[in-house]
Image (cartoon, helix red, strand yellow):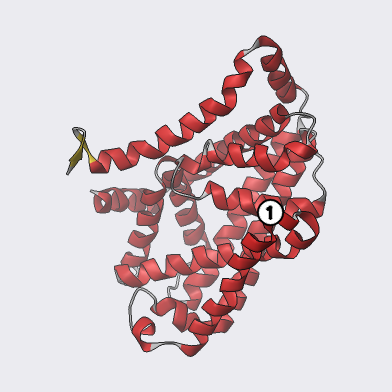
Amino acid sequence: MRTFGVPVKRLRAIAPWVIGLAILAYLLWPYRLPEKRAVFVSAFRNAPPWAAGAAVAGALAAYIADTFVTWCVFAWTHVRMRFREVAIIRGVTYFFAVVNYNLGQVAMVVVLARKGVRAARATGIILFMMGINLVVLVAFAATAVAKVEPRLRVVVWAVAGLLPLYLLVIAVRPRILASRELFAPLFDLGLRGHLLGSLARAPHVIAMMGAHFAIMRAFGVAVPISTAALFIPIIFVVAVLPISVQGLGTTQAVAVQLLAPYAPSDAAVLAYSLYTQVIWALTLVVIGTVCVRTQYGRSIRTAAAAAKK
Protein backbone atom coordinates (compact mmCIF):
# COMPACT_ATOMS: atom_id res chain seq x y z
CA MET A 1 0.00 0.00 0.00
CA ARG A 2 1.23 3.50 -0.89
CA THR A 3 0.39 7.01 0.28
CA PHE A 4 1.31 9.77 -2.19
CA GLY A 5 3.67 7.30 -3.87
CA VAL A 6 5.47 6.40 -0.62
CA PRO A 7 5.07 2.87 0.83
CA VAL A 8 3.12 2.94 4.10
CA LYS A 9 5.88 1.00 5.87
CA ARG A 10 8.42 3.59 4.78
CA LEU A 11 6.09 6.41 5.76
CA ARG A 12 5.69 5.00 9.27
CA ALA A 13 9.45 4.90 9.66
CA ILE A 14 9.92 8.49 8.43
CA ALA A 15 6.94 10.14 10.16
CA PRO A 16 8.36 10.11 13.75
CA TRP A 17 11.57 11.75 12.51
CA VAL A 18 9.62 14.40 10.62
CA ILE A 19 7.34 15.16 13.59
CA GLY A 20 10.15 15.24 16.14
CA LEU A 21 12.47 17.41 14.04
CA ALA A 22 9.61 19.77 13.13
CA ILE A 23 8.77 20.33 16.81
CA LEU A 24 12.44 20.80 17.66
CA ALA A 25 12.88 23.27 14.80
CA TYR A 26 9.89 25.24 16.11
CA LEU A 27 11.42 25.38 19.59
CA LEU A 28 14.81 26.45 18.24
CA TRP A 29 13.44 29.02 15.78
CA PRO A 30 13.50 31.97 18.23
CA TYR A 31 17.21 31.32 18.85
CA ARG A 32 18.10 32.28 15.30
CA LEU A 33 18.35 35.83 16.64
CA PRO A 34 21.87 36.65 17.89
CA GLU A 35 20.83 37.82 21.36
CA LYS A 36 18.64 34.78 21.94
CA ARG A 37 21.25 32.43 20.54
CA ALA A 38 23.83 33.88 22.92
CA VAL A 39 21.60 33.01 25.89
CA PHE A 40 21.08 29.48 24.55
CA VAL A 41 24.80 28.87 23.99
CA SER A 42 25.58 30.37 27.40
CA ALA A 43 23.27 27.82 29.06
CA PHE A 44 25.49 25.02 27.71
CA ARG A 45 28.74 26.78 28.54
CA ASN A 46 27.71 27.48 32.12
CA ALA A 47 26.81 23.87 32.86
CA PRO A 48 29.38 22.37 35.28
CA PRO A 49 31.55 19.47 34.04
CA TRP A 50 29.90 17.06 36.49
CA ALA A 51 26.62 17.34 34.55
CA ALA A 52 27.96 14.97 31.89
CA GLY A 53 29.08 12.56 34.60
CA ALA A 54 25.61 12.66 36.15
CA ALA A 55 24.02 11.86 32.78
CA VAL A 56 26.37 8.95 32.08
CA ALA A 57 26.07 7.60 35.63
CA GLY A 58 22.28 7.84 35.45
CA ALA A 59 22.18 5.96 32.15
CA LEU A 60 24.47 3.22 33.48
CA ALA A 61 22.49 2.89 36.72
CA ALA A 62 19.23 2.74 34.76
CA TYR A 63 20.72 0.06 32.48
CA ILE A 64 21.75 -2.13 35.43
CA ALA A 65 18.38 -1.63 37.15
CA ASP A 66 16.51 -2.37 33.92
CA THR A 67 18.56 -5.52 33.43
CA PHE A 68 17.69 -6.63 36.97
CA VAL A 69 13.93 -6.19 36.58
CA THR A 70 14.00 -7.89 33.16
CA TRP A 71 15.94 -10.82 34.66
CA CYS A 72 13.37 -11.05 37.48
CA VAL A 73 10.37 -11.01 35.12
CA PHE A 74 11.95 -13.66 32.91
CA ALA A 75 12.52 -15.87 35.94
CA TRP A 76 8.95 -15.36 37.17
CA THR A 77 7.59 -16.35 33.73
CA HIS A 78 9.83 -19.47 33.66
CA VAL A 79 12.30 -18.11 31.10
CA ARG A 80 15.61 -19.18 32.64
CA MET A 81 18.54 -16.99 31.66
CA ARG A 82 21.78 -15.87 33.25
CA PHE A 83 22.06 -12.26 34.38
CA ARG A 84 24.87 -11.68 31.86
CA GLU A 85 22.66 -12.88 29.01
CA VAL A 86 19.86 -10.54 30.06
CA ALA A 87 22.35 -7.66 30.29
CA ILE A 88 23.42 -8.30 26.71
CA ILE A 89 19.79 -8.51 25.58
CA ARG A 90 18.95 -5.17 27.18
CA GLY A 91 22.03 -3.60 25.62
CA VAL A 92 21.15 -4.91 22.16
CA THR A 93 17.55 -3.72 22.45
CA TYR A 94 18.80 -0.27 23.52
CA PHE A 95 21.00 -0.17 20.42
CA PHE A 96 18.06 -1.04 18.20
CA ALA A 97 15.59 1.22 20.01
CA VAL A 98 17.76 4.32 19.47
CA VAL A 99 17.34 3.73 15.73
CA ASN A 100 13.93 2.07 15.69
CA TYR A 101 11.84 1.43 18.83
CA ASN A 102 9.82 -1.36 17.18
CA LEU A 103 13.00 -3.19 16.17
CA GLY A 104 14.05 -3.16 19.82
CA GLN A 105 10.82 -4.88 20.78
CA VAL A 106 11.20 -7.39 17.94
CA ALA A 107 14.66 -8.27 19.29
CA MET A 108 13.13 -9.06 22.69
CA VAL A 109 10.46 -11.27 21.11
CA VAL A 110 13.15 -13.08 19.12
CA VAL A 111 15.15 -13.79 22.28
CA LEU A 112 12.12 -15.19 24.06
CA ALA A 113 11.18 -17.26 21.00
CA ARG A 114 14.63 -18.85 21.14
CA LYS A 115 13.80 -19.93 24.67
CA GLY A 116 10.68 -21.66 23.41
CA VAL A 117 8.20 -18.88 24.21
CA ARG A 118 5.50 -18.37 21.60
CA ALA A 119 5.28 -14.92 19.98
CA ALA A 120 1.95 -13.99 21.59
CA ARG A 121 3.12 -14.96 25.08
CA ALA A 122 6.45 -13.18 24.52
CA THR A 123 4.53 -10.04 23.61
CA GLY A 124 2.48 -10.43 26.78
CA ILE A 125 5.66 -10.59 28.88
CA ILE A 126 6.90 -7.38 27.25
CA LEU A 127 3.51 -5.76 27.89
CA PHE A 128 3.85 -6.67 31.57
CA MET A 129 7.27 -5.02 31.77
CA MET A 130 5.96 -1.89 30.05
CA GLY A 131 2.91 -1.91 32.32
CA ILE A 132 4.80 -2.00 35.61
CA ASN A 133 6.98 0.83 34.34
CA LEU A 134 3.86 2.93 33.80
CA VAL A 135 2.50 1.93 37.21
CA VAL A 136 5.64 3.21 38.97
CA LEU A 137 5.65 6.46 36.99
CA VAL A 138 1.97 7.09 37.76
CA ALA A 139 2.57 6.30 41.43
CA PHE A 140 5.25 8.98 41.67
CA ALA A 141 3.08 11.50 39.82
CA ALA A 142 -0.08 10.73 41.80
CA THR A 143 1.61 11.22 45.17
CA ALA A 144 3.07 14.57 44.14
CA VAL A 145 0.23 16.12 42.17
CA ALA A 146 -1.84 17.24 45.16
CA LYS A 147 0.93 19.47 46.49
CA VAL A 148 2.44 20.63 43.23
CA GLU A 149 -0.04 21.26 40.48
CA PRO A 150 -3.77 21.25 41.36
CA ARG A 151 -4.69 21.78 37.71
CA LEU A 152 -3.29 18.35 36.87
CA ARG A 153 -5.11 16.52 39.65
CA VAL A 154 -8.02 15.42 37.49
CA VAL A 155 -5.80 14.02 34.74
CA VAL A 156 -3.23 12.28 36.95
CA TRP A 157 -5.74 10.93 39.43
CA ALA A 158 -7.99 9.74 36.60
CA VAL A 159 -5.09 7.69 35.21
CA ALA A 160 -4.17 6.50 38.72
CA GLY A 161 -7.81 5.57 39.31
CA LEU A 162 -7.63 3.07 36.46
CA LEU A 163 -5.01 1.06 38.35
CA PRO A 164 -7.43 -0.44 40.94
CA LEU A 165 -9.78 -1.35 38.09
CA TYR A 166 -6.95 -3.08 36.24
CA LEU A 167 -5.86 -4.96 39.38
CA LEU A 168 -9.46 -6.03 39.96
CA VAL A 169 -9.53 -7.56 36.48
CA ILE A 170 -6.26 -9.36 37.23
CA ALA A 171 -7.71 -10.71 40.50
CA VAL A 172 -11.02 -11.81 38.95
CA ARG A 173 -9.32 -13.40 35.92
CA PRO A 174 -12.20 -13.14 33.39
CA ARG A 175 -11.98 -16.18 31.15
CA ILE A 176 -12.33 -14.19 27.93
CA LEU A 177 -9.04 -12.44 28.73
CA ALA A 178 -7.13 -14.96 30.84
CA SER A 179 -7.54 -17.65 28.17
CA ARG A 180 -5.79 -15.52 25.54
CA GLU A 181 -2.09 -16.27 25.16
CA LEU A 182 -1.28 -12.58 24.77
CA PHE A 183 -2.69 -11.68 28.20
CA ALA A 184 -1.85 -14.95 29.96
CA PRO A 185 1.45 -13.68 31.48
CA LEU A 186 -0.41 -10.82 33.17
CA PHE A 187 -2.82 -13.20 34.87
CA ASP A 188 -0.19 -15.86 35.58
CA LEU A 189 1.88 -13.30 37.49
CA GLY A 190 -1.23 -12.12 39.32
CA LEU A 191 -1.41 -9.43 41.99
CA ARG A 192 1.73 -10.67 43.74
CA GLY A 193 3.71 -10.55 40.50
CA HIS A 194 2.52 -7.00 39.78
CA LEU A 195 3.54 -5.88 43.26
CA LEU A 196 6.96 -7.52 43.05
CA GLY A 197 7.42 -6.24 39.52
CA SER A 198 6.62 -2.69 40.56
CA LEU A 199 9.08 -2.91 43.46
CA ALA A 200 11.75 -4.29 41.15
CA ARG A 201 11.06 -1.56 38.58
CA ALA A 202 11.26 1.28 41.13
CA PRO A 203 15.11 1.49 41.21
CA HIS A 204 15.15 1.89 37.42
CA VAL A 205 12.73 4.80 37.52
CA ILE A 206 14.42 6.36 40.56
CA ALA A 207 17.82 6.21 38.82
CA MET A 208 16.45 8.05 35.78
CA MET A 209 14.61 10.61 37.88
CA GLY A 210 17.65 11.25 40.05
CA ALA A 211 19.87 11.86 37.04
CA HIS A 212 17.36 14.26 35.47
CA PHE A 213 16.93 16.14 38.72
CA ALA A 214 20.70 16.58 39.10
CA ILE A 215 21.14 17.79 35.52
CA MET A 216 18.24 20.22 35.91
CA ARG A 217 20.02 21.79 38.86
CA ALA A 218 23.27 21.92 36.86
CA PHE A 219 21.48 24.06 34.27
CA GLY A 220 19.92 26.32 36.88
CA VAL A 221 16.44 24.76 36.72
CA ALA A 222 15.62 24.99 40.44
CA VAL A 223 12.75 22.52 40.66
CA PRO A 224 11.70 21.43 44.18
CA ILE A 225 11.89 17.68 44.73
CA SER A 226 8.11 17.36 45.12
CA THR A 227 7.59 19.17 41.82
CA ALA A 228 10.20 17.02 40.09
CA ALA A 229 8.40 13.89 41.34
CA LEU A 230 5.39 15.01 39.33
CA PHE A 231 6.93 16.59 36.25
CA ILE A 232 9.74 14.14 35.47
CA PRO A 233 7.40 11.11 35.11
CA ILE A 234 5.24 13.16 32.75
CA ILE A 235 8.31 13.93 30.65
CA PHE A 236 9.21 10.22 30.63
CA VAL A 237 5.74 9.19 29.47
CA VAL A 238 5.84 11.72 26.63
CA ALA A 239 9.30 10.45 25.65
CA VAL A 240 8.02 6.93 24.92
CA LEU A 241 5.02 8.00 22.84
CA PRO A 242 5.55 6.62 19.30
CA ILE A 243 4.98 9.99 17.60
CA SER A 244 8.66 10.93 17.53
CA VAL A 245 12.05 9.18 17.70
CA GLN A 246 13.07 8.65 21.33
CA GLY A 247 10.92 11.63 22.30
CA LEU A 248 13.01 14.07 20.26
CA GLY A 249 11.12 17.36 20.06
CA THR A 250 8.12 16.25 22.10
CA THR A 251 10.23 15.83 25.24
CA GLN A 252 11.74 19.28 24.86
CA ALA A 253 8.33 20.89 24.22
CA VAL A 254 6.82 19.39 27.38
CA ALA A 255 9.92 20.17 29.47
CA VAL A 256 9.80 23.85 28.48
CA GLN A 257 6.09 24.09 29.29
CA LEU A 258 6.44 22.46 32.71
CA LEU A 259 9.82 23.69 33.92
CA ALA A 260 10.17 27.23 32.53
CA PRO A 261 8.75 28.87 35.71
CA TYR A 262 11.62 27.34 37.72
CA ALA A 263 14.41 28.27 35.30
CA PRO A 264 16.30 31.50 34.55
CA SER A 265 15.07 31.23 30.96
CA ASP A 266 13.35 28.90 28.49
CA ALA A 267 16.79 28.43 26.94
CA ALA A 268 18.07 26.81 30.16
CA VAL A 269 15.26 24.22 30.11
CA LEU A 270 15.74 23.50 26.41
CA ALA A 271 19.49 23.17 26.93
CA TYR A 272 19.04 20.78 29.88
CA SER A 273 16.63 18.60 27.92
CA LEU A 274 18.77 18.38 24.78
CA TYR A 275 21.97 17.90 26.78
CA THR A 276 20.48 15.03 28.78
CA GLN A 277 18.92 13.35 25.78
CA VAL A 278 22.07 13.50 23.65
CA ILE A 279 24.46 12.20 26.35
CA TRP A 280 21.94 9.57 27.49
CA ALA A 281 21.47 8.33 23.92
CA LEU A 282 25.22 8.23 23.26
CA THR A 283 25.76 6.26 26.47
CA LEU A 284 23.10 3.73 25.48
CA VAL A 285 24.61 3.46 21.99
CA VAL A 286 28.01 2.67 23.54
CA ILE A 287 26.43 0.07 25.84
CA GLY A 288 24.50 -1.38 22.92
CA THR A 289 27.55 -1.44 20.65
CA VAL A 290 29.54 -3.39 23.24
CA CYS A 291 26.66 -5.86 23.67
CA VAL A 292 26.03 -6.24 19.92
CA ARG A 293 29.69 -7.11 19.34
CA THR A 294 29.49 -10.13 21.65
CA GLN A 295 28.79 -13.48 20.04
CA TYR A 296 25.40 -13.68 21.71
CA GLY A 297 24.59 -10.11 20.70
CA ARG A 298 25.47 -10.75 17.05
CA SER A 299 23.14 -13.73 16.94
CA ILE A 300 20.28 -11.62 18.35
CA ARG A 301 20.96 -8.83 15.85
CA THR A 302 20.88 -11.23 12.91
CA ALA A 303 17.72 -12.97 14.06
CA ALA A 304 15.93 -9.69 14.82
CA ALA A 305 16.83 -8.20 11.44
CA ALA A 306 15.50 -11.34 9.72
CA ALA A 307 12.27 -11.27 11.74
CA LYS A 308 11.70 -7.59 10.89
CA LYS A 309 11.75 -8.28 7.13
Above-or-below relation of 34 to 210: above
- Total number of numbered discs in the rendering: 1
Residue occupying image coordinates x 77% and y 52%: 227
In front here: 3 or 108? 3
Which residue corresponds to mark 1? 207
Above-or-below relation of 261 to 241: above
Residue occupying image coordinates x 82% and y 40%: 222
| Quadrant, the N terminus | top left
Q: In this rendering, does residue 208 appear at all?
A: no
In the picture, measured across the screen, residue 93 lies left or right of residue 215, that is: left
Q: In this rendering, does residue 111 appear at all?
A: yes
In front here: 56 or 240? 240
**Residue 184 occupies which quadrant of the picture?**
bottom left
Image location (x, y in percent) of residue 255: 65, 40
Above-or-below relation of 96 to 142: above
- Say which element carries label 1: helix
**Residue 156 occupies which quadrant of the picture?**
bottom right
Image location (x, y in percent) of residue 126: 44, 65
Image location (x, y in percent) of residue 62: 62, 53
In front here: 223 or 63? 223
In the picture, measured across the screen, residue 150 lies left or right of residue 1, that is: right
Which residue is farthest top? 34
Above-or-below relation of 216 to 164: above
**Three-letter code, disc 1:** Ala
Badge 1: how crowded within 10 Å, few (<14), some, or many (20+)? many
Image location (x, y in percent) of residue 221: 78, 37
